[in-house]
Amino acid sequence: MDEVIGVAQEAASFDFGIIKMFYHISPEGADEPLFEMDADRFFDAETLGKALDLGGSTVQATSRALPASFVGTTLGKLLLTQVYLYGMYGSVIDLSPERLTFQIEAHDDHAHLGFRIKELLAETVPTEGAARQLAEAWTAHVRAFLRPAVEAAAEAAAMKPAAIWQQYGAMAEYMKEYAATLALPEPVQERLSFAFRVLAEDIPAEAFGTRRNPYQHNPRYCDNPYPTGGDKLMMQSSCCLYDQREGGVKCYTCPMLTPEQRAERREQVLAEQAG
């Protein structure tokens, strides 16, 4: 990566607005959490089971599969938070479990899952050797926390971890696509692009216990029947299991839908919009 301009700021000045809005990760945390637990309690089967059952009850889940999916993708957003902060500030923060509180917040018929960062400790990443430093830090995070936590959630729901890992690719692409719509300074754009490459290419697959790094993904698109969002919608990289709830159906962008099923759903959406 060419040298970029930008001096890391004090951690207290970091703006978590976008990350809090989309990922529910911030130093402030949720306004009115329904449930909280220290993140190292992911490795306590009884406490984790209670979290899954409570999270599932807020969305009328028919098993632990859906809340485990939500928990697993929430865990994966911690590394995407690191990508964002490196892009914006040239820094990474300590997101080890002892510095995190996992939270569930209920909102009508859905729930927000996220993390409160107990203490904001940032480290500046020098331009020289940045790829190595980021890759080493993020690989250590995967091995020490992300992988064991994902595997614990999957085990508690009697599902394979792959059902969680396979959702990570589209998560990264969604963030990349959204960041491209922002009016960001060129140095920030360069750092973001660089960090996404490190995330997808420099963390070895074996750290995740998978055949390939789950953040690697070639996005696919389908026609958008909705009035906003352009002509195409990015498809998910794997089923999010949102149909595993009372009256649930697969998402319009689910890759598990056949072309015929998606066409039928598209007509339903268009008919609903027509009134």
Image (tube, helix red, strand yellow):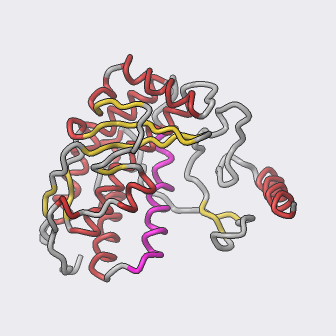
Q: Residue at x 63, y 64 (%)?
A: 233
Q: Main secondary structure of the magenta part?
A: helix
Picture quadrant of residue 149: top left
Residue 177 is a magenta residue: yes
Residue 210 percent location from the top left of the image:
40, 41
In the displayed structure image, the side of residue 183 where residue 237 appears, left or right: right
Picture quadrant of residue 8: bottom left
Residue occupying the far top of the picture: 46
Q: Residue at x 54, y 42 (%)?
A: 107
Work out whether 59 lies above or below 230: above
Work out whether 94 lies above or below 105: below
Residue 243 is a magenta residue: no
Q: Residue at x 60, y 34 (%)?
A: 59
Magenta span? 164-183
In the displayed structure image, the side of residue 219 where residue 82 appears, left or right: left
Q: Quadrant of the C terminus?
A: bottom right
Q: Residue at x 46, y 39 (%)?
A: 105
In the displayed structure image, the side of residue 220 where residue 24 appears, left or right: left
In the displayed structure image, the side of residue 159 where residue 117 appears, left or right: left
Residue 264 percent location from the top left of the image:
83, 53
Q: Nearer the viewer, residue 212 or 61?
A: 61
Residue 54 percent location from the top left of the image:
50, 26
Picture quadrant of residue 195: bottom left
Work out whether 68 lies above or below 8: above
Residue 86 percent location from the top left of the image:
25, 64
Q: Quadrant of the N terminus?
A: bottom left
